[in-house]
Image: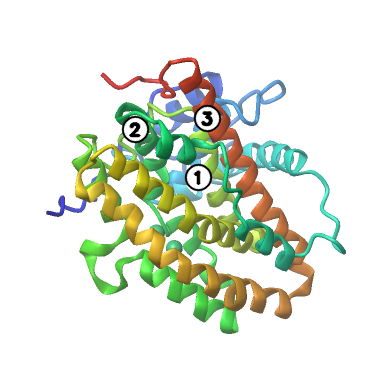
Amino acid sequence: MSTLPVLAQPGLPYAQGPISAEVIERLGGRAPHNHLEPVWVPLRDADPFGLDVQLALYICYELHYRGFAGVDADWEWNAGLLHLRSQFERIFLAAVRREVGSIDPEADTAEREMARLSTEPADGSGPSYHLRDAGTWTQMREYFIHRSLYHLKEGDPHAWLIPRLGGQAKAAFVAVEFDEYGAGSAARVHQQLFADLMAAADLDPSYLGYLDAVPAESLAIVNLMSMFGLHRRLRGAAAGHFAATEITSSPGSQRMVTALQRLDAPEACVRFYREHVEADAVHEQVVRHDVVGDLVQREPGLDADVVFGMRAFGVMEDRLANHLMTCWRDGRSSLCRPLP
Ligand SMILES: [Fe+2]
Ligand SMILES: [Fe+2]
């Protein structure tokens, strides 16, 4: 059974500090006629990976997706707010670059990086390994919540890349996205499959239903892809990010299937991940050869950016994995608002 597609706009979240508070307060009013009226917040001591900055950035990006109920749609292209967003992006991107470290254009090619991503350690220690071997149903439901921000808009953040590609890379990229969007069937749109998973796990399937519940690490994962997708100059990183997502998805999804079967989870929960085991094994090949292969052949100057996108994906995933494993090892909830 399919839950009805939820197209309602989310409400604005609660502030998590002075920066997000300022953005939320502004959005509560009409966008000013004078586009150049600056929106100013003190960013000098702000932590680029902290919850306050990540939430403020998430809110700015969300104006390009569904917006928020009651928020003036004109804010989307308000120059004052875009200027503020660019400052969040500047400190966030700089922090991601620091974490990724230097990339040697001779040794670190996109092709080598994809080959490296394809070989998974058999004895990994991340959340999907833990959930497969020993995780509880409560931890599984927390995991769904962290992932809900992305999976309920799956496909969308990468879709900004379409107009920036050409030739075979564009054709192959759209073929993969076609599957993410259900190959013509609304019931099979991956966003919908995840909404079905949430409902089956007795969780709120609404879009951004858990925006107030997740930590900075979960927001940063989606912010990274929105940032890459929305900037043409970062198109190489967006393609690399997309490739890393597809390459790592199939084995990770297999672990989730095993975990969910061990926990005797509802069929709709298993279905979402089972769909990704098979589809992403195919997507991986298409992305490696036809998307990234074609793109770097066409624009060799983007090769290092593609590697950066793949590594940035890994950095963000590791940050969330560390958070989850630390919380679960300590026997506490990984959410800001624990499940009842
Ligand atoms: Fe998918
Ligand atoms: Fe996929």
Amino acid type, mark 3: Ala
Q: Which residue is mark 1?
A: 222
In which quarter of the view is residue 339 placed?
top left
Q: Position of residue 270 (x, y in %)?
A: 28, 50
Viewer-closest of 83 and 226: 226
Q: Quadrant of the C terminus?
A: top left
Amino acid type, mark 1: Val
Q: Residue at image x 44%, y 76%?
A: 175
Task: Name the secondary structure under disc 1.
Answer: helix
Task: Name the secondary structure under disc 2.
Answer: loop
Pointer 3 or 1: first along the chain = 3
As displayed, is residue 236 above or below residue 308? below
Q: Residue at image x 59%, y 74%?
A: 291
In which quarter of the view is residue 115 placed?
bottom right
Q: Position of residue 49 (x, y in %)?
A: 62, 30
Disc number placed over residue 210 in the picture, else none: 2
Q: Residue at image x 22%, y 50%?
A: 268
Amino acid type, mark 2: Tyr
Residue at mark 3 to residue at mark 1: CA–CA distance:
10 Å
As displayed, is residue 306 above or below residue 146? below
Pointer 2 or 3: first along the chain = 2
Viewer-closest of 191 and 156: 191
Viewer-closest of 218 and 21: 218
As displayed, is residue 30 above or below residue 309? above
Q: Which residue is mark 3?
A: 216
Give the class, few, some or many, for how many residues have Cα within 10 Å of label 2's Cα (few <14, many ≥20): many
Answer left or right for 315 relative to 5: right
Q: Position of residue 273 (x, y in %)?
A: 35, 53
Task: Name the secondary structure under disc 3.
Answer: helix
Q: Quadrant of the N terminus?
A: bottom left
Give the class, few, some or many, for how many residues have Cα within 10 Å of label 1's Cα (few <14, many ≥20): many
